[in-house]
Image (cartoon, grey):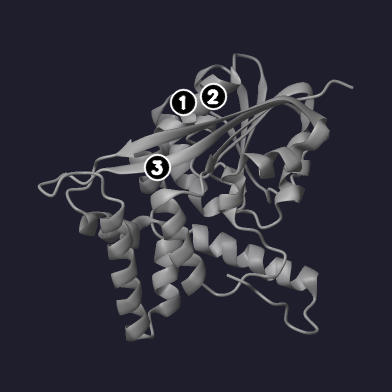
């Protein structure tokens, strides 16, 4: 979708408005339910891939409700969970208590992390920082707060299959983004990631993987679940709520996508493949 700039628009003001909108958006629905139902294993996988161990200082960026941060704390690391939307911290603290761990929760923009250079041994982000609009700024911040020789680990949504089509619908029906804002799906492209980190890192390992989701009886169940819980979809329906024709169009398009990508049999349950990119790299020593 091509977006043109509005004449006379102040870029900084537009960026502030976008960040405010993102914070409000990710507080909608029930993000913690989505995270625990669909994405919770990402936390364990990313912690293992980064080799996190006791005593390390770890920063999880755009942590949501802590699926990575909590797993890192379980390994004995000193963990800071940062996120633009502190409304989700309550669920995260409750989950951390249930796991018997404590960690620090800090409201922070992934594009302006309030931490010192080289402060952390490991910096992680699972399907979180990718939603910040300025990818190069995010990469710069992740590298900046990681110590020389430290580890940076991410999980990004691949621009393929079900999620690609879902995002296309969301972007088409949502308010237009500023002209310099990039799609989160670009983080799932290996070439894009290499350009973002450049020669500041070494041993940049990227692995495409698939998560199988089989919790829905039929495609309609997936659509109902997303409408009720996923912040991006809840926000989308809120945006078009006063226009019944657009609500009907959105219902139809989401159902078509959910049906198209169902890999289960006609007798159920529905089966979906969630393709993602596991990224692990190390900041170069000075």
Q: Which residue is mark 1?
A: 44
**Is residue 154 among what the camera can see?**
yes
Location of residue 6 in the rendering, given as x and y in whole percent from the top left corner: 73, 82
Q: Element type at marker 3?
A: strand
Q: Which residue is mark 3?
A: 274
6 vs 101, nearest the viewer = 6
Q: Element type at marker 1?
A: helix
Number of disc labels: 3
Q: Which residue is farthest top? A: 54
Q: Please state which of the two labelled residues, at mark 2 or mark 3, is closer to the viewer.
A: 3
Quadrant position of residue 175 = bottom right
- Cα distance between the residues tagged 2 and 3: 19 Å
168 vs 37, nearest the viewer = 168
Location of residue 114 in the rendering, given as x and y in whole percent from the top left corner: 76, 44
- Cα distance between the residues tagged 3 and 1: 17 Å
Which part of the image, by quadrant, shows the N terminus?
A: bottom right
Q: Is residue 43 above or below residue 15?
A: above
Q: Element type at marker 2?
A: helix
Left or right, 154 with respect to 268, comes to right
Left or right, 140 with respect to 58, comes to right
Q: Are marks 1 and 2 in contact (CB under 8 Å)?
A: yes
- Cα distance between the residues tagged 1 and 2: 5 Å
Location of residue 52 in the rendering, given as x and y in whole percent from the top left corner: 59, 19
Left or right, 281 with respect to 119, comes to left
Which part of the image, by quadrant, shows the C terminus?
A: top right
Q: Which residue is mark 2?
A: 47
Quadrant position of residue 182 = bottom right
**Is residue 85 among what the camera can see?**
no
Residue found 59% across the figure and 74% down from its top: 176
């Amino acid at each position: 979708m091509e977006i043109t700039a509005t004449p006379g628009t102040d870029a900084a003001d537009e960026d502030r408005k976008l960040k405010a909108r993102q914070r409000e958006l990710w507080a909608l629905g029930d993000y913690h339910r989505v995270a625990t139902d669909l994405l919770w294993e990402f936390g364990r996988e990313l912690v293992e891939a980064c080799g996190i161990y006791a005593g390390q200082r770890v920063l999880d960026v755009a942590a949501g409700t802590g699926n990575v941060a909590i797993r890192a704390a379980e390994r004995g690391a000193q963990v800071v969970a940062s996120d633009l939307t502190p409304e989700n911290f309550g669920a995260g603290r409750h989950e951390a208590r249930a796991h018997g761990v404590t960690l620090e929760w800090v409201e922070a923009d992934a594009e302006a992390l309030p931490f010192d250079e080289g402060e952390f041994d490991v910096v992680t982000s699972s399907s979180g920082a990718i939603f910040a609009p300025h990818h190069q700024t995010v990469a710069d911040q992740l590298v900046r707060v990681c110590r020389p020789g430290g580890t940076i680990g991410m999980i990004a949504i691949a621009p393929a299959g079900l999620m690609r089509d879902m995002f296309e619908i969301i972007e088409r029906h949502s308010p237009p983004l500023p002209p310099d804002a990039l799609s989160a799906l670009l983080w799932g492209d290996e070439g894009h990631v290499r350009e973002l980190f450049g020669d500041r890192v070494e041993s940049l390992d990227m692995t495409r993987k698939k998560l199988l989701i089989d919790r829905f009886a039929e495609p309609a169940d997936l659509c109902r679940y997303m409408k009720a819980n996923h912040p991006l979809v809840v926000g989308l329906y809120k945006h078009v709520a006063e226009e019944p024709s657009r609500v009907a169009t959105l219902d139809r398009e989401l159902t078509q996508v959910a049906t198209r990508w169902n890999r289960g049999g006609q007798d159920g349950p529905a089966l979906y493949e969630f393709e993602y990119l596991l990224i692990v790299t190390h900041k170069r020593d000075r």
